[in-house]
Amino acid sequence: MTTMESLIGLVNRIQRACTVLGDYGGGDNTFSSLWEALPTVAVVGGQSSGKSSVLESIVGRDFLPRGSGIVTRRPLVLQLHKTEEGSQEYAEFLHLPRRRFTDFAVVRKEIQDETDRITGKTKQISPVPIHLSIYSPNVVNLTLIDLPGLTKVAVEGQPESIVQDIESMVRSYIEKPNCIILAISPANQDIATSDAIKISREVDPTGERTFGVLTKLDLMDKGTNALDVLEGRSYRLQHPWVGIVNRSQADINKNVDMILARRKEREYFSTSPDYGHLGSKMGSEYLAKLLSKHLESVIRARIPSILSLINKSIDELESEMDHLGRPIAVDAGAQLYTILELCRAFDRIFKEHLDGGRPGGDRIYGVFDNQLPAALRKLPFDRHLSVQNVRKVVSEADGYQPHLIAPEQGYRRLIEGALTYFRGPTEASVDAVHFVLKELVRKSIGETQELKRFPPLQAEIAAAAGEALERFREESKKTVIRLVDMESSYLTVDFFRRLPQEVEKGGNPTTSTVDRYAEGHFRRIGSTVSSYIGLVSETLKNTIPKAVVYCQVREAKQSLLNYFYTQIGKKEGKQLSQLLDEDPALMERRQQCAKRLELYKSARDEIDSVSWAR
């Protein structure tokens, strides 16, 4: 195989592999750019311009659907692969992998059936391409894209937008800078009215990417010829025009062999008084060789950019493979080690959230600095220490004998009743911190890239961490309730020792004694209790956060997964394997990445070897 055939064949294989791997027509944008970087040939023309006949002449096989009106209703990506002389010809469809077609009449029917599967048995069109590969010793390595024929009016059964829809579809292919345009025009129509030339000139005004093909030369009126077009006088392109003589309808009806049709085409040009001097540069065989030679020059010019794109894709794929991770060992010891490493990775991220390396831990401080003080301020002490309630509590505490000097039992009951209100905010602080810790566990699991492979292990770690946090919460609640209860069990004596002195400083203790059943007396009691409760509130505002951090945050940092580690060490190999079951989608993604990586590395090596051989 020549260097040219090797280079074009390599590009064909890359395009084929990209298609199989989903990099073209629905794959990742990162990878589909490789397809677009490789040159292709798009066949453009009006309906009934002879596009199908040109393609069949290049292939040397009668395999395309025929009929009146719009026949090609989906793009056909046709990849030709040259095989060894004497080898059997066959075709393969992407949507029917591992099935070879040797009967090209069946290929034609499958193209029609696959078109109908998407569009229905109507005259609608679809941009979803059909991918067909043909392997034959009678072709040159090429990738051709057959597009629906351009039209000017919608016929019955078509939407009014069909004209614009087809044009938009055609433009989406030929606007790409790496697309070579094969503009098909019938010779029995004025070139000035050619749909193919009109749209090609709009996207390729310099004609650098356009090859003009003139069909139906044998159907021109007697006494006329197409030399002005073929010799570039009517419309000049940077590449020479090529004339084609298609099979007649009679030949098609008789199933005239394409090889025989090629021979008849050569005879037509060699014996034609009008085109004899151009005979060596006319015909479908010459067109295929011309395109192949041009493709080689384009590919050679693009080798640096193609290699750059392939190397970039290799780097991205290797990076993704690192994220996805390598296959897991089957040895139980290695699996246990892997699980512990994954747990440590999660634990590291969890601690970063708590310590400030990642966001979230600051919400715990927000509980202590905002939520707890706000809740303490909202406690209903005004109602509890109202004159009416103070009188009621003091009176009930006195029993049948009223207090003589100071209602000590009344004070104690008022204080004890007020202190019970602190239980709610302290328990709420514990629950709020618990909620933050649970959320940080969830976030940390999600941010541990290595864990994404193993949903069962994620669930197990989440459950173990959740159980540990529940234990910490229960211990924390017991501790903060003890702090509140301790305030009830022993009052701060110094606070009350100062009260008689302050009364004496007021200078009128007698009044206090005389009016001890009046409203002012109960108001003073309520005020005294309120002051003491304020002192307790300040104390709890400082001690509650210490208790919560000690019982919950500190424990979460130090021993969140300790119980899990103990249990995991008791598991057998089968149970460890179950924890390391991977997400099927992720396994599929790794396999796809591995295939792409193999493709791109192979392509890089082959391009290097072919380019050095020139």
Image (spheres, rainbow, N blue to C red):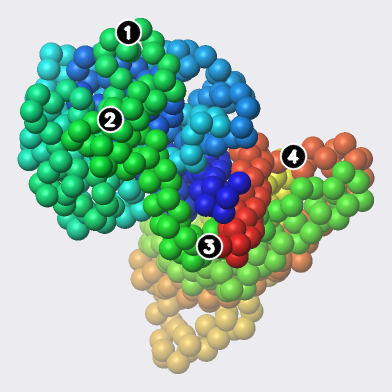
How far apart marks 3 and 1 lie (CA) works out to 48 Å
Which one is in front in this view, the residue at disc 3 or the one at disc 1?
Answer: 1
Between disc 4 and disc 1, whose residue precedes?
1
How far apart marks 2 and 4 lie (CA) works out to 73 Å
Q: Position of residue 127 (x, y in %)?
A: 31, 32
Which one is in front in this view, the residue at disc 3 or the one at disc 2?
Answer: 2
How far apart marks 4 and 1 lie (CA) works out to 60 Å
Q: Which residue is mark 1?
A: 253
Labelled pair 3, 2 in contact (Cβ < 8 Å): no
Q: Which residue is mark 2?
A: 271
Labelled pair 2, 1 in contact (Cβ < 8 Å): no
Check residue 581 in the rendering and tell me which mark sits there, or answer none: 4
Question: For the point 10% across and 46% down, which residue is it?
Answer: 234
Choose top left, top right, bottom left or bottom right for residue 172: top left
Report the side of 524 relative to 183 (left or right): right
Between disc 3 and disc 2, whose residue precedes?
2
Question: For the point 53% across and 62% down, which residue is it?
Answer: 307
How far apart marks 4 and 3 lie (CA) works out to 37 Å
Quadrant of the rendering where the C terminus is positioned: bottom right
Above or below for 313 versus 223: below
Give the secondary structure at mark 3.
helix
Residue type beneath disc 1: Asn
Above or below for 611 versus 272: below
Above or below for 273 versus 463: above
Question: For the point 56% across and 17% down, which residue is it?
Answer: 102
Is any part of residue 314 visible from this angle?
Answer: no
Comparing 153 with 128, the one in front is: 153
Is any part of residue 313 visible from this angle?
Answer: yes
Q: Which residue is mark 3?
A: 307
